[in-house]
Amino acid sequence: MRYMTAGESHGPEEVAIIEGIPAGLTITAADINEQLARRQHGYGRGQRQVIETDTVTIMSGVRHQVTLGSPIALNVHNDDHNHWSKIMDPNSPATVENSMRKVLRPRPGHADLVGGMKYRHQADLRNVLERSSARETVMRVAVGAVAKKLLAALDIDVHGFVTNIGPASSDLTQLTKYKTLAELRAITESYPTRTLTATDDEAMREVIDQTKRQRDTVGGTVQVMATGVPAGLGSYVSADEKLDAKIARAIVGINAFKGVEFGGGFANATKYGSELMDEIYWSAERGFYRGANHLGGFEGGMTTGEMIVVRGVVKPIPTLYQPMQSVDIDTHENHRASTERSDTTAVTAAAVIAEAMVAIELAKAILDKFDTDSLSRLQEQVSAYREEIKHF
């Protein structure tokens, strides 16, 4: 499985093409739109989410709501393009009129300046920010929706939620109350901050409100969990085949993510080996299993069969309504950075995007290991493999 996205933040369309999804998977636009709506909702989002109503059009690879095995093309229209059609017109030469809203004062923390240097976009840094914008993640969520449908057909569930926004944090011991991710999903999706309790939600909303009053932005942490993943996905034989490494790359590849950890994560550095290693047990019902999950479902770059637990750190959005110090790229004079429309925080959306990326990497790993032509054959092979490792 592989995919590619295309599109600019204020361009006419966002596009993705997915190759390698087996034939026979039922998928509808409604399945994808449900995930796109989750990405748009959440406390702290900005005006762009009011303008846009993200809905997908399935252009190819699906017939009568069932995948064909051929490449799947997905399209999401940018409603906000209506206000930018001249500025972002791909078919007309540049004029004084359609070159309005140039960006010449790069924003600290964004790709503006370095991207301009790399691609020689010295005339207008908008050429950088339009693609480096997190708007592109709408298509990663769309691709993730397809991946999640595939995983669900194999009894694998994935869910992402928020563990902290700024100084307001959740007590992760609360997770022991939930027997399934479906139960956890029902709770976290009921709060506008996608967190674990009403108390946590209130505290996080207060942080966001205070930040907005200060015309500032705030970051946070999201957690993604996956259940039903069979042992042995990934490999120890080469560094680039380690599945946890692939997931780490996918998480840090999301806009504004600056760190990733598995299981106990960085806190594991304060522990002794005797406290930390997930001891091995066996039962006739389960086969081999671990007595704990400090390592987040991975050993040697491979899944252990335990729940996958991944966390990602999201920095505050760099676009501020009280712009920071910058320099005009034409005059080299000190100026305040350019201001673009922004969210107070995108952590609530980041949980959905991280969930999509974990789902994509798990789907890739499954499709690397088993037959990818037919869903029914894939299901037979995964079922047989589960039985094999259960009786190892």
Image: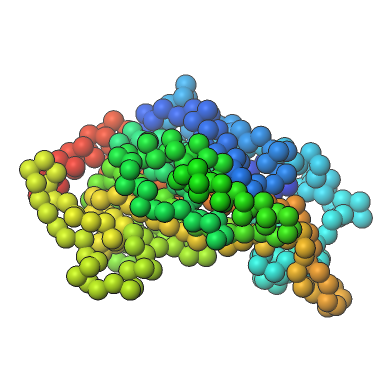
In this rendering, the answer to whether 277 lies above or below 60 is below
Residue shown at 53%/46% (left/top)? Answer: 201
Residue 17 visible here = no
Tag count in the figure? 0
Residue shown at 27%/34% (left/top)? Answer: 379
Of all residues, the one furthest to the right in this rendering is 96
Residue 378 visible here = yes
The percent position of residue 273, horizontal first and vertical second, equals 22, 72
In this rendering, the answer to whether 114 lies above or below 378 is below
Residue shown at 75%/69% (left/top)? Answer: 324
The percent position of residue 77, horizontal first and vertical second, equals 67, 37
Is 111 in front, or is 50?
A: 50
- Say whether residue 392 is left or right of residue 355: left
Is 237 in front, or is 174?
A: 174
The percent position of residue 248, horizontal first and vertical second, equals 42, 61
The percent position of residue 134, horizontal first and vertical second, equals 62, 53
